Amino acid sequence: MEGRDAIEAAGAARFPQHALTHTLITGASAGLGLELARLFASDGHPLVLVARSEDKLRALAETLRRDYEIDVRVLPADLSEPGAADYLAAHLIADGPGIRHLVNNAGVGAYGPFGERSWDVDQRMIQLNVTALVGLTHLLLPSLRAGDGYRGILNVSSTAGFQPGPLMAVYFATKAFVTSFSEALHEELRGTGVHVTAFLPGPTKTNFCTTNQMIPAGVVADDGTVDEAALVEFKRREAKRMDAGEAARAGYEGYLTGKAMVIPGRRNQLLSMVPRVVPRMVVRRMVHGMMKK
Ligand SMILES: NC(=O)c1ccc[n+]([C@@H]2O[C@H](COP(=O)([O-])OP(=O)(O)OC[C@H]3O[C@@H](n4cnc5c(N)ncnc54)[C@H](OP(=O)(O)O)[C@@H]3O)[C@@H](O)[C@H]2O)c1
């Protein structure tokens, strides 16, 4: 046995049941991942925090150790690099604690007409949003299955996955994948003690829009001047976004009660019904219109 099979087998063999202790959270340096880290920590779960920004992870780890007296480890990694999941899993199996809860949260979006986009950027998005998530799930599942007590995987998807997303075609498609994959696993693993939840936030107040350059072009011109009216409209829409702590709490509680899918907030729940009742052609045109704004 070699390569990935060996990593999976080593994971299952190395962790006796009592050793599944830690919660691994990807994208823990900001936004929903950081809020999820706080929630797990506040219930006494020791953590392994993953993201690229080592300084932010270290600062968060220090705060959580101090506030909740738990073990918090930091594992900086760029999950958009090929092989990142193998690197993380191999590191954990050789050196790290057993993972009881895997929170696949790290993700990015990217805005713009598909035909004008860089393949490199889209490939890295797929690598992060899909390949790393599936990879970590593959590699850690054998040890999760071998464990006991409440354990499992919380995958952060999005209500975006319910419909096609013209102008964010690849991002919406990655989230459709995450929801479908997570729901399928939830069913496959029913009765094994390993719980899988798809967490589908709608628009949430995090760095997501600024990181992913989703501030509409009309707000800031190429020369840096700001259109005040467009900025007011942008802020008005931003204010409707859900608080990240509130959204994360719904995901956390839904995961701990074994839900297959969690959509936080009434507004998101209602809006997510639209693509299920309105004809597909209407939905994709509606989304296109909204995305142009
Ligand atoms: N905000 C929303 O409106 C919204 C709605 C639905 C779903 N979501 C989903 O929620 C998840 C979290 O997003 P967020 O809104 O919290 O965004 P955010 O505030 O931008 O946080 C993203 C997190 O992912 C990490 N990350 C980004 N690229 C990474 C990489 N290559 N390798 C490792 N870590 C990486 C970032 O840390 P570093 O930069 O330090 O690496 C950061 O910790 C994503 O999966 C997103 O699709 C967000």
Image (cartoon, rainbow, N blue to C red):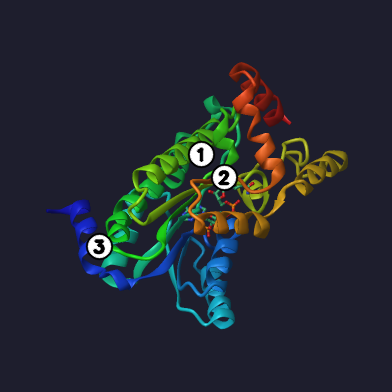
Q: Indicate yes or no: mark 1 CB to ligand 1 under 8 Å.
A: yes
The residue at the point 50 percent across, 53 percent down is: 105
Q: Nearer the viewer, mark 1 or mark 2?
A: 2
Residue situated in front as seen by the camera: 94 or 293: 94
The reply, left or right, for residue 235 in relation to residue 151 is right
Which residue sits furthest front?
Answer: 191
Q: Is residue 217 above or below residue 23?
A: above
Report x, y in % for residue 218. Answer: 77, 35
Q: Which residue is mark 1?
A: 175
Which numbered disc covers residue 11? 3
The quarter of the image holding the C terminus is top right
CA separation in Å, label 1 and label 2: 9 Å
Q: Which residue is mark 2?
A: 200
Q: Is residue 62 above or below residue 107?
A: below
For the residue marked with disc 2, what is the amino acid? Leu
The residue at the point 56 percent across, 74 percent down is: 59
- Dot 1 crowding, Cα within 10 Å, few <14, some 14–19, many 20+: many
The residue at the point 31 percent across, 54 percent down is: 141
